[in-house]
Amino acid sequence: MDIKTGYISSVHAQDMLHGTVIRSPISQGKITSYDIPAFSPDVVVITAQDVPGSNSLRVLQETMPFLTQDSIQYLGQPIMAVFAPTYEQAKVCTSSISIQFDTQPPEKNQTGVFSETSASHGDIEQVFASADQIIERSYTCREQQSTFTAPTGAFTKLDGDKIMVTASTQWPFHVRGTISEVCAVGKRKVLVRTADYSPNYGEKLIYPSIYGCLAALASLKSGKPARLISRFPMTSPRITVIRKSALNSDGDLTGEDVLITADIGAFPLFADEITEHLRGGAMGYIPAEAYRISVKALYSPNPPRCHFDGFGFSAALFSSETQISEICSAARANPAQWRLNRYGGKELHLLNGAVIPASPLHELMEGVIRKSDFHRKYAVCRMNQLQRNSHSVHAGYLRGIGIASGYAPNGFSRNYPWEKKYSVSVRLDQNNKITILTSLCSSGASHAWKKTCSDVLGIAEEHISVLQGDTGNLPNSGPHIISRDIAMITPLVRRCCESIKKQRFKQPLPIVVKRGFKARSEEAGKEFHRYLPFSTVAWGAVVVELEVDSVSLMPEFRGIWCALDCGKIYDEQQLRKTLRTKLLRALQLTVGSRITYDYMPRTDIHFISREHSMPVSGTQVLIGLFYSAFCSALSQALNRRASEIPLSPSEILELLEEL
Amino acid sequence: MKIDCQLNGKPKEFYVSSDIPLLQLLTEYAHISTLHPDCGKGMCGNCIVLLDDLPVLSCLIPAFEIRGRQITTLERFQKTRDYTDIIKGFERTDSMPCSYCFSSKILLAHGIISRNVSPEPDEILQTYSIHACTCLDVSQIVKAVAQAGTYRGRRRRYARRK
């Protein structure tokens, strides 16, 4: 392709058409009629009738409609697209199209559960019946919008019988497959190149495929290049966790009953994966005589949800850790000491009885406790909390400190059949030139891949490159989500290099080695009672100290201390930068507003490096633990129970006004 | 409506609706590729350009306001010595912004050190508070701009002595 890849907003071509999408303003109903006026010949309108192939998108095993013809299933559902020589003209044409809707719900109203999973052990009813104390709390991660990301969109142009696509996508092969099916052209005739997308945020899994199809249809209809950029809000699922803990007279956990529901929108995209992640995150690290975890992914007439913070593991982890802090609070125990006593040494027992022989949790906890001076600050804040008049809103000194620790996984929860087709290649050329070929575009992980090659083959890093290509010359490495780039691709790169090492000096150059994903143990996925349900995890501990401004009610962070075990660390500075950005993003989502440079807190991140392990991403664990430590600190500062994310000053005021 | 201005040092004429934002004029009509705006409402801070050498959010400036004025984007600015001061400052402190916000962060730094080559941390942070990308830490941004200011001051003194 002759187009220099940059952000999608930077891609231009001669005679390019600019597109806008007309979306449904109602969440359920029917289109009764629409009126498209006669536009000038250089305006292209794409409706469902213009789709030559399948009018649907396949996402792994599930499908969702592409352009609707009559039935509206969610708010903002694409109905048609208008392309014109300028964006302004496209907007004017869009406003002159009238669509009539019947807002009655469709006859076949879709409701209910898309996916559910559960796990249980022991007699939960008996344990609760004999409990000395029961603590029941509800935790909610409300819908959060991913704001201020790099633009989402796609650019297409025709080159002979080929469709050349540049899309800001985390999954270029999905864009290719979808365009191929919707436009009824062979997959080899669609070449997709990834445009830059903001690596720090980015939820660009499904929508770029929709925009790519619309732009491709416009190019096919007009013969001109077309670009469509959309600012349709991307929203995460609403996750509610109800946790009931049974405690004995010593304050030890004897039973745990957890019910989790997630609103995942109108279509069950990634529903099974979401339920698995939620179940894993809800598990906790304190073994109990009996437990029951039920997880449901529910339908709602909302747009398909985005997963910019993973598949919900952080939300479930937030509930597990905040519940522990609640238990400690009820027992008037120091939450850090309580955890350290329960975790014991290196051996960690999970709620389901699984034993992790070498957990770094104790070491991480001790690290953040020491750095933050947790015990002293906790004692002072606790004393202040107990002495405060519970009816006073303006107590003047609203300070608290919270701690959380745990793990979070990288990659999918189990081995799916479709994952076997994903692969990575490494090529050794003359003059010791190494090229890594993968469809995952990741500036952060590429350094780890190069270092891995360098370690195995003893070739200097400057001779190693990651090929910037398109779907025509890169292998399909799957979607770039849940840190697959670092946790899944790096081991494959290593396997490729080890194979090259064996063939080197024996086989003629170039030597090309391709490695795919191996089937993971089926047992690990199925037998929840015996195993840690994920194969690659990162561990962490976080302390948050804050003070609520007694006038603006905005939490002012006095410090955030994090300790993480992310396996082998290749570039500590880069990793620190990435995690700090993720932490600030989590902070932004937590307080429900934009974080500016004059508000940014001091963050202290330190790592445990393990030389003989593979690198893992600490993003998810950091987010989940931050949510929990924040809520614990806020609860202590306000002397009220904070159990929702996000919490804006107006919601903090509501909490304070509760009697 | 005809709008003439100086864009990146060259006289330009645009025939556009008078009320479109400068951002749209720059990206769609002038094909400026260093701007990566997201919000279009002055919230993301990613559409900063220099208007008569002052950094402004181009999504909030109507096209008619640029008549007869000078607009500079990173395309032109990176060919100047002022840019070299800033980039050296960011490099020296190991604080390079990400590619998404690079243009805006550099132009904001220029705005600060053009006024004052020894800015106070508060002034730096207040100026950068219009930017939503948090790829750099508070300390990084303060050090980088202060260092850029040092280079700018040194160059000015040297030019005066000559």
Image (spheres, coloured by chain):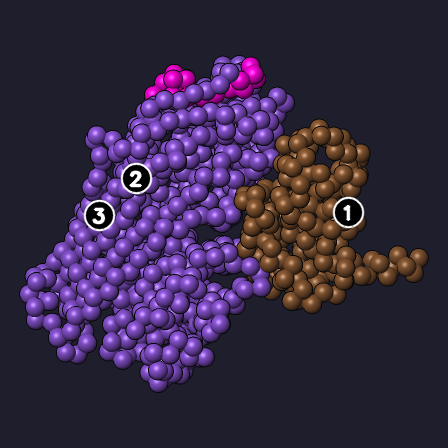
From mark 2 to mark 3, how far is it between C-alphas?
A: 16 Å
User: Colour in which chain A is shown?
Assistant: purple
Q: Which mark is residue A301?
A: 2
**Chain B's colour?**
brown
Find residue B64 and name its label. none
Between residues A391 and A567, which one lies in front from this camera angle? A391
In the image, which residues are magenta?
A: A39-58
Q: Which chain carries label 1?
A: B
What's the residue at 11%, 67% (across, down)?
A: A128
Foreground label between 3 and 1: 1
Q: Which x, y percent locates residue B76?
A: 74, 41
Quarter where residue B79 is shown: top right
Chain containing mark 3:
A
Q: If the image is split into quadrants, where does the N terminus of chain A sit?
A: top right
**Residue A381 appears in the picture as rendered:** yes
Instruction: State the residue position of label 3.
Output: A296
Q: What element carries label 3?
A: strand
